[in-house]
Image (cartoon, helix red, strand yellow):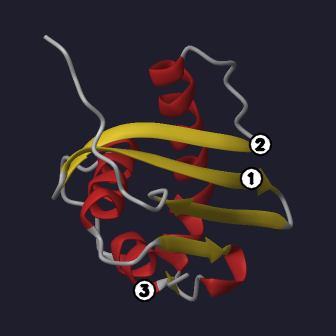
Amino acid sequence: MTTTTSPLLELLATPLGPNGTIDGLAEQLLARVATETAVELSLNFDDLTDRQSQRLIRPLLACLARMSATENGTEFTPYGGALAFTRTGLAGVVRIVGEFENRLGAVRLAIRRPIPVVPIETTL
């Protein structure tokens, strides 16, 4: 299994634009995971070397938890748990799953597209 941290670190370190939001950053992260060549992307707080990333990571994790709960009709758990999303990737609609922890002293994220990547069929 291929694991990398650099796409997530790059995204967090990139300055937010004047209209940038945590929701927008979360969508950028999910779009990157949907199209990234790496199978799994992960990071923990110790990986973050710049102040912007350190400030953004905890609100970003809470935002991802809220988005996942809303999309799946599950309970919102901002401090840790499972994540699941459906996004459009290079091969069509794909499932993205992950786990996170969002507590003082324990901040981590692991997010991936399950292998094999099987497009989700949608019906209209």
Residue drawn at x 45%, y 72% as measured from the top left = 39
Q: Is residue 83 left or right of residue 5?
A: right
In contact (CB < 8 Å): disc 3 and disc 2: no
Residue 33's place in the image compared with 44, above or below, is: above
Q: Give whichever of 71, 91 is nearer the camera.
A: 91
Q: Which residue is mark 1?
A: 102
Amino acid type at image mark 1: Asn
Residue drawn at x 27%, y 44% as measured from the top left = 119
Q: CA distance from mark 1 to mark 3?
A: 20 Å
Q: Which residue is mark 3?
A: 6
In contact (CB < 8 Å): disc 2 and disc 1: yes
Q: Could you say whether the residue bearing mark 1 is in a helix, strand or loop?
A: strand
Q: Give whichever of 57, 2 is nearer the camera.
A: 2
Amino acid type at image mark 2: Tyr
Q: Which residue is mark 2?
A: 79
Q: CA distance from mark 3 to mark 2?
A: 24 Å
Q: Residues within 10 Å of mark 2 (few under 14, many from 20)?
A: some
Amino acid type at image mark 3: Ser
Q: Could you say whether the residue bearing mark 3 is in a helix, strand or loop?
A: helix
Q: Say which of marks 3 and 2 sits in front.
A: 3
Q: Say which of marks 1 and 3 sits in front.
A: 3
Q: If the image is split into quadrants, where does the N terminus sit?
A: bottom right
